[in-house]
Amino acid sequence: MLLEKLSPLFIIFAAVKIKPNMLEIQRIRTDKDGILKGLSKRHLHAEETLDTIIKLDAEWRGAKTEMDGISAELNQFAKKIGDLYKSGQTVEANALKEKTTELKANESTLKTKVDSLEAEITKLLYTLPNVPNEQVVAGRDANDNETVFEFGSTPTFDFEALPHWDLAKKYDLIDFELGVKVTGAGFPFYRGKGAKLQRALISFFLEEASKAGYEEIQAPLMVNEASGIGTGQLPDKEGQMYYMPADDFYMIPTAEVPLTNIYRDVILPSADFSIKMTGYTPCFRREAGSYGKDVRGLNRLHQFDKVEIVRIEHPSNTAKALEEMMEHVKGLLEKLGLQFRILRLCGGDMGFASAMTYDFEVYSAAQEKWLEVSSVSRFDTFQANRLKLRFKDEDKKSQLCHTLNGSALALPRIVAALLENHQTADGVIIPEVLRAYAGFDKIG
């Protein structure tokens, strides 16, 4: 099924020169059992796919070697023919030229075979998700995720607590019905102090990221297909992205896509690097099939605001970078005075491109449920392989970088939790860290 879905995407491969990365195929050749063991945590049985890749790769390498040999031979003949013409030996030159006709035909046939095998290998490689980190447990769904950290306590009220959609209506903060009129469900209007609270949160998150050493970047809201493939959204999430066929552009589901793609087809000059980027963008997700009480109000939107943090790291620094990103998100939630927990996702609940993911969830006091507000993930070489993002090591050899990203933070459920958890009988108290940005300390 996935292979059929992939087919239209491969029209672009020749244009953008996307080719299978031999280092990663080398990993499949040398560590097939390890890869199978890792993918089994996702409940994916990929032995047939890996065997096919290994077989096709062997054919590709054989055909490529033969083609390169013929090309070298033709180059030698071309030089010899040129020398013969220069020396006036026209008959001999023409005779030798006749002999190259068959070699050129063989070279052309082999090139067609090499290109065809290359496309088949690439097509199969893009069906394989990332191999989970050894710390990731095998599990089928969210029920198997591990809670690794908890902070805060559940608020108690001596009045009837309202869910955020009722608070938004009571204090004229968010108009969901107007959004349905103008666009459709999942596209709310923020008004008055609701809009100012959004702006305050964005400013707060960006300032905190800047203090932590992240470069702020304002990125495009649309990307081309190669960018979506580079970070793993395509083809995996093709049906979840808004697509504009007239221009062949996709609306971004997160700032991760344009920010990480800044470094597509880049070779960093040395091993001494640590790249930290942050960006605020609206995000667009179709969320096909989402319905019911779990999507009410701000719980699940088609357009929402988010501040993202992205890192490109030397492989030796990936674990440390992940810990730093988690501490950053923890700090934001603590300063907002929200009860939260951190989950390490099991293999069956992780995203396609992730090697390890930690979800941050805040507790919604009025809804009496946990709401995901951030995912912090390491991708190791998975995205870098697609992006052809490399660095020169101490021996001046090219190596794949590691990439990481995280939400810091997504606004809708943060707003929901702030309204619900900080509500009083006569209004909503604004956390102290937001008051300078918002210009008010209370709603109501």
Image (cartoon, rainbow, N blue to C red):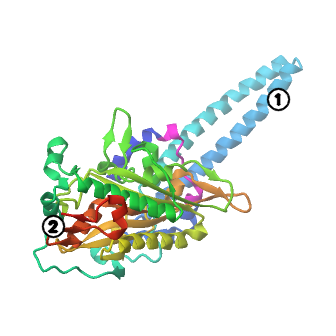
Residue 116's disc is none
Judge whether residue 116 is colored magenta.
no
| Circle 1 residue | 80
> Type of residue at label 2?
Pro
Q: Residue at x 39, y 45 (%)?
A: 221
Majority SS type along the magenta span: helix
Quadrant of residue 141 within the rendered picture: bottom left
The magenta-colored residue range is 13-25
Number of disc labels:
2
Judge whether residue 16 is colored magenta.
yes
Position above or below: 158 against 263: below
Q: Is residue 98 visible?
A: yes
Front-lying residue, 359 or 113? 359
| Circle 2 residue | 163
Secondary structure category for the residue under label 2: loop
Secondary structure category for the residue under label 1: helix
Residue lying at the far right of the rendered structure: 87
Question: Residue 117: horizontal and vertical position, in percent?
Answer: 52, 46
Left or right side of 237 for 218: right
> Type of residue at label 1?
Lys
3D distance between C-alphas at marks 2 and 1: 84 Å
Q: Residues within 10 Å of mark 2 (few under 14, many from 20)?
A: many
Question: Residue 70: horizontal and vertical position, in percent?
Answer: 69, 39
Q: Residues within 10 Å of mark 1 (few under 14, many from 20)?
A: some
Quadrant of residue 159 within the rendered picture: bottom left
Front-lying residue, 330 or 196? 196
Q: Residue at x 31, y 52 (%)?
A: 1
Q: Is residue 126 visible?
A: no
Position above or below: 123 against 224: below
